[in-house]
Amino acid sequence: MARIVVAGYGNVLRGDDGAGWRVAEAIAERWGERVCVLLGQQPTPEWAPVLAAADVAFLVDATREAGAGLSVRRLEPVMDGQLVDGHTFGPGHLLGLAAALYGHVPESYLLLLPGRNFDFGEVLSPGTARAAQRALRFLDGQLRAWHARAGGGGA
Amino acid sequence: MPTRRILIDPVTRIEGHAKITIVLDEAGEVSDARFHVTEFRGFETFCQGRPVWEMPGLCARVCGICPVSHLLASAKAGDMILGVAIPPAADRLRRLANLAQIVQSHALSFFHLSSPDLLLGFDAPPEQRNIFALSSSHPEMARAGIRLRGFGQDVLAKLTGKKIHAAWAVPGGVRSPLSADVRTELADRLNEHLEATRHGIAAYKTALRGFDEEVRSFGSFPSHFLGLVGADGSWETYDGLLRLVDAQGTIVQSSIQPGAYSEFFGEASESWSYLKSPYYVPAGYPDGMYRVGPLARLNICTRMGAPAADQELAEFRSFGRGAVLGSFHYHYARLIEILASLELMGELLADPELDSDICRAQAGINRLEGVGVTEAPRGTLFHHYKVDRDGIIQWVNLLIATGQNNLAMQRTIGQIARAYVRAGQFAEGALNRIEAGIRAYDPCLSCSTHAVGQMPMQVQLVDSRGSVLDELRRD
C-alpha cells in the first residue's frame, strides 16, 4: 500500500479559507486508513515527520491568489528560515524541515482552491465549492493510481 | 539636537503583532522604551449576551496556542456561577489537559522559537539563526522538540477531541472521560519525552555559560511575582490560592482567594498600546509591577511536587538571592515546568479516579457572578463573568498572563537598550537582544487584547523628520 498524506489546512469558520480542510476531511471519510489525513489551521512542524515517512503528499489550501479553478503544482522544499515564525511557516518550509531533520521528502503537490469570501461563516462560496469537488475527483484519481502502483485497492 | 526614535517593527517569533519604539534624548542616550501591541480582539464585549454554558467553547477561541487555559478558566468561572463542586474525575482530567497544554506550549517556546537564539547565539545573522539552522547544528534536539510538542497535542486531542479549540470543559465538569487503553498508551510515551526534556535542560545549561551579559540585562530587576500555589505551597497550575512574593522572595500575600483578585490587582491603560498594564494595587501604578508565568511560579512555590523537577528547582534557586530576578531565566523555568508536567501527567494517568465516567455536575444558576483562575503557560489567567438569572452573560473581564507581564516587558526593553545603545548608536547585536528579551516572556498578544471601547487611542501623523503634523486622540 502506498504511503499517502493528504493535508488540508485553513480556518473552517472563515468561509472559503476552510476549503482545504473540508477536502481533506472528505478524503478521510472516503479512504479511511488507506490515507493519512492531516487537518490544521496551517502547516506545523509536527507534520514534518509524517510527511518524511510518506511516498507522496498532497497539501490542500485556499487562496485569493488562485485563478478561477483548481490549480495543482509540484512543491519543492524551502530551507530559508530567516523569517519563519508560527504564522509564516508554509508548505515549502514543511518540506524543508522534513528534508533537514528526517532526510526524506515525498513527491509533493500543492492543490490551491480559489477563495472569494474569507469572512465569518461555514459555507463555501459557489466557485470554491466547485473547485473543492474537482479537487476531490483529482485526489481520488491520484490515490487510486498510487495504490494501484503499489498493489493496493481503490475507493 | 532633536530626540530620535528607533523602531523595531515587526517583532518576530512571538505570538501576535507588536512593535517597539526606543526614544533617545538629546545626548543620544535611551530615555524611554515602549512595547506597542498593535492588534486588537474584543472578546470582553462580544461575549456579552451569550449563555454562560457557551463561554468555555467561545473563549477557547481566544488563542490557538493556549486555548485550554481559556477553556478551563472559563469553565471554572461557570462552576462558581452554578455553585457546584465538580466530580473528582473531571478535576483530574482538567488538570491533565492543563499540564499537556503547558508541555506543548513550552515546547513551542523553547525548542521552536527561542532555541535558535540560545544555541546558535544572539550574534548569528538571521539566516543562520532559525529552525533550519538548528536542524543542521542540533538535529536531535530539533526532532525531540517536534515530538515533545506533538505529544502534548496528542494528549489534548485524545482527551478533548481536538488539538486546539476544543469545547470539552463545561461549567460543572467535562464532556467526556478518558479510556483506560488511551491512558496506558499515553503513559507509555512519557519516558521518551522526559529524557528529551533532560537533554534540553543540559543543552540550555551549557549555552547559559556564554550569556553572562544577557542574563544581567534581560529584565533583571526587582519586582513582585504572582501565581497559584497548592494548599501546601507547592507548584500549582489548575487551582489553589494566589500567592504574591517580593524580590527578596518574601511572601507578601499568602492566600488571595481567586474571587477577590480585583481588590489587589488593577488594570491601567496607555494610549500607545492595546495591551493593558495590570499592577498590584497596594504598591500603586506603575510601581506595582509584577511578573507572572514560569519564572514567577518557580519563585512563589515551595516545591514542584515532582522528584526530577524538584532537583532542578534547587539549582534554579541558586540564580537568585531571594527570588530569581532575571527574566532570562524564564527559559530555564519553562524547561523545569515541562519536566514537572510530564512527571505529574504520569501520576494523573495512573489515578484510579479516572476509571469513573461521572465527570459532570448538573445545576442551574445559583450565583450571578463567577471568577475562574488557572495558570496558563504564560502565567495566571483570570476569567470574571456576571450573568443574569437565566445565565446570560452581562459583563466580562479577562485578565491575561501576557498583560500582567506588560510593565516588566517595557522595563526589560529599556534595560537591554541601555546596555546596548551608546551615544545614539546600537552596539552589534542589540536589535537581536531586544527581541530576544521580549521573547523570554513568550508573550501571546492575541490572548491579551480584549477590551473594546475602553482603550485610549492616539493617532499621530508624523513627517519624515519626526515632527507631529496632526493628532487624533480618545482619552
Image (cartoon, rainbow, N blue to C red):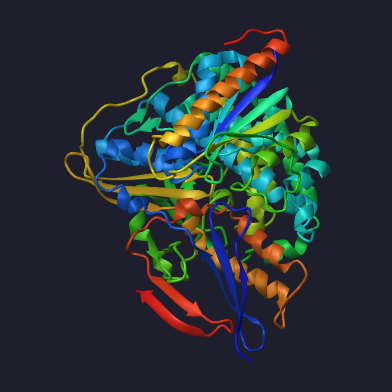
Q: Residue furthest right?
A: B137
How many numbered marks appear? 0
Left or right: where does residue B131 sit relative to residue B169? right
> Residue B198 location in percent, x, y?
73, 37
Closer to the camera in the image, A107 or B295: A107
Residue at horizontal 41 percent and vertical 37 percent from the top:
A125
Q: Is residue B205 visible?
A: yes
Left or right: where does residue B145 sit relative to residue B377? right
Is B251 above or below relative to A144? below
Q: Residue furthest left?
A: B389
> Residue A95 location in percent, x, y?
72, 36
Residue at horizontal 53 percent and vertical 26 percent from the top:
A134
Residue A77, quarter of picture: top right
> Residue B262 location in percent, x, y?
34, 57
Question: Quarter of the image containing the N terminus of chain B?
Answer: bottom right
Q: Residue furthest front?
A: A68
Closer to the camera in the image, A74 or B226: A74
> Residue A81 location in percent, x, y?
72, 49
Residue at horizontal 66 percent and vertical 72 percent from the top:
B417
Question: Quarter of the image containing the C terminus of chain B?
Answer: bottom left
Closer to the camera in the image, B20 or B184: B20
Q: Is residue B226 visible?
A: no
